[in-house]
Image (tube, rainbow, N blue to C red):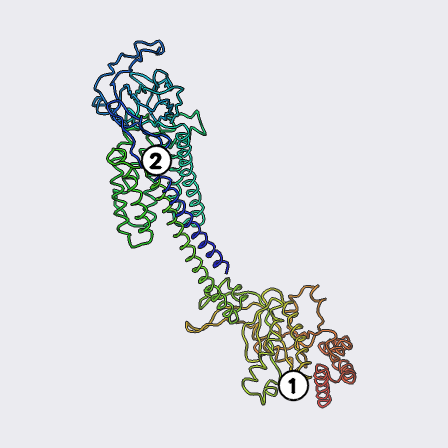
Amino acid sequence: MAYIQRSTFFDKAYKIGRIFCIFLILSLSFYSCTYHKKNPPKVEKGVIDLREWDFEKDGRVKLEGEWEFHWKKFCKLSDINLNNEPEFYTDCNLMEDTYLKVPGNWNHLGDTKNPSYGYGTYRLNLLLPKDFKPALKLNMIASSKEVFLNSEKFVSSSSLSKDTSLPPRAKRELLLPNSEVQSITIHVSNFLLRNGGLTQAPDIGLKDELELEQKKNLAWDFIIFSALLVIGLYHIVLYIQRSDDRSSLYFSIVCITLSFRQFLTGNDTIYEYIPNISWYWATIIGHLFYFLAVVFFLSYVKSLFKVSLLKLYYSYQILFSLIALIILFTDLTILNTLTKISFYVLPIIFIHILYIIIRNIRTTQGKIFLATFLIFLACALNDMLLFLRIIDGVFLGSTGFLIFFLGQASLLSSLFSKAFKENSEMKSILQIKVNELNDMNLTLSKFVPKDFLNELGKTKITEFELGDAMEGDFTILFSDMRSFSTIAEGMTPPELIGFINTYLSTVVPMIHKYNGFVITYLGDAIMAAFPHKPSDALRSALGIMEALNSLNQKRFHEKQHEIKIGIGINSGTSMIGIIGDKGRMEPTIMSDVVNLSARLESLTKQYGINIVFSNETYDRLTEEEKKEFSFRVVDQVRVIGKKVSVSLYELYKKGWNDYTDLKIKYYEKYEYAYELYKKGEIKKSYLIFKYLLIEIPSIKPVQYFFRDVNNYLKEIQTVS
């Protein structure tokens, strides 16, 4: 029941999670797909005319198009003092017909060895509505730079140089001029990155709109970071719950690495929380997370589909692992080269992954993976075409990226839920089988006692084999019912079986109570073994007689025959083991000890007693145990097959009945007469036995010994 409840819980959690993911995907897609319906003006030959543009109605404008550009010149603005460094700046002919597209790079202008390295000046003239004071947003100019609005310097990098450049702080910045903007001049130098120049165009618009957009971008970054981090941590928990499937572990690592990459290289999120962080190290660590994400993503795909892969697939992992290791000990120049290499390898990897998906398209995970992967590729292609200025629209890469990972999270959650449900069902089935086996073992233990198995050094009934045996010191109890034929006469077979089972159910618990176990049933007879102490067998015999007395009282009221039994007890070395053949086996115990205990039981009829035990058992009792029991010497006999005589002791208990109380009352006289008998003083023993016969004529040992000595004396007289 617990498994079913947990499974239902996971099913509900999965459904709620899936609905949440769909809602989040639609919300984020709607957020990403909002863009201006009206096409904004473009920069043409260094000029953009925005006089007819309604910034309040139509929104911001990206300053994209043909900017005026001066290669390897930092153009001097004539009306300001540029740090008293006249040799650093150059007079530029502002009417030169040199233009460069923004966003874009100047790589085609550089030398063959390092085409992205160099410096230059971008300039743009703006025609704005009258009295309009715009806000200007610089979008991640990663190179060293100086920015002038009209003749006022707003941004300056200390790393701006004509031959080297230190890592800049590439933060998006919002510039708020105090007057109308007529021109924008940007000095840029790059000797680190793979693309030099203005790779992103600035935005111009209303202050409130640009600030709101900047906050949206930060929020968007935080959403992606948080979503990926939560998904990653969630799947770590899934892996802990089900560590045999590593797909959730690899996926969690991918999500966590990409979440921190987004935090480091996204829309300035890192600078909001850690303002003084090094842009250089943020870039290095961001790329490290990127390469590691690729490595573990390949492992995730391999683990998810569990297919044999081409050797080329493993070479991808090795390549990206080596790159991740190298970039920790290199500079941005080599990093740019390695990143460029990875861009050529990634399409091949995507094709290989598509091949794996197509091979597994019939599976649920294959369909979900393909659908989300195609969405991701479509969004990535859209961004690529937008970046190349082939189409117009909005960037959807981050949306596709999040859709893909939310889809994978939904996929793994469904697989985990399915596996958990199957596991729960399997556990339920196994539990049923275990219960059946336990019931079977319990049933079999009724045929082969557990204590018997323990003596053989076994814990399960399935472990014993034909021929298993063990020798040890045991006390054997043998009991048999007297006048069984008389009692059974007139009973139908079912009544007879019911009678025997009632009797056994009454007396056998006394054997188990005192650490014994039944070796075998011989109809109404019982043979039991006590492996620990001989006193256990004596206590058990007394318990059997008390239980039998209770049963006889019930039978007396039902006007049924009284059940009388005899019990013989003997101790010594015995062999227990498994006998039979391969078709049928059973436990047994073999020794003279067993045979003698059966013969002792038969002597109880002769002496008119219930329980008799041998001197072997007597000798094994401690002094404390001897004080615990009431017993008396009955006789010393020589049993058939034995050369040595065996001393017999009767075991009884005070208060059993009047018969027992008489034995106790005259015990000392009986014992004295018996000692005289053993010494050969027959005449003296005769007189005492004759007295006892008058006082307790119902005691069979008294009858037996009086008859014996009387016959002996008659023989003597006859001879005389």
Q: Nearer the viewer, residue 534 or 705?
A: 534
Label 1 close to label 2 by CB (< 8 Å): no
Q: Nearer the viewer, residue 570 or 647?
A: 570
Give the residue pinned by disc 1.
561
Give the residue pinned by disc 2.
290
Q: Position of residue 184 (x, y in %)?
A: 32, 20
Q: Position of residue 674 (x, y in %)?
A: 73, 77
Q: Is residue 617 above or below residue 92?
A: below
Residue at disc 1, secondary structure: loop
Q: Residue at x 35, y 39 (%)?
A: 34
Count of numbered badges drawn on the protein = 2
Q: Is residue 410 left or right of residue 448?
A: left
Give, as a three-letter code, the residue at label 2. Tyr
Q: Is residue 251 left or right of residue 40?
A: right
Please report whichever mark, 1 or 2, sits nearer to the chain's N-terminal start: 2
Residue at disc 2, secondary structure: helix
Q: Pick the quarter of the image with the C terminus.
A: bottom right
Give, as a three-letter code, the residue at label 1. His
Q: Position of residue 347 (x, y in %)?
A: 25, 39
Which label lies toward us, 1 or 2? 2
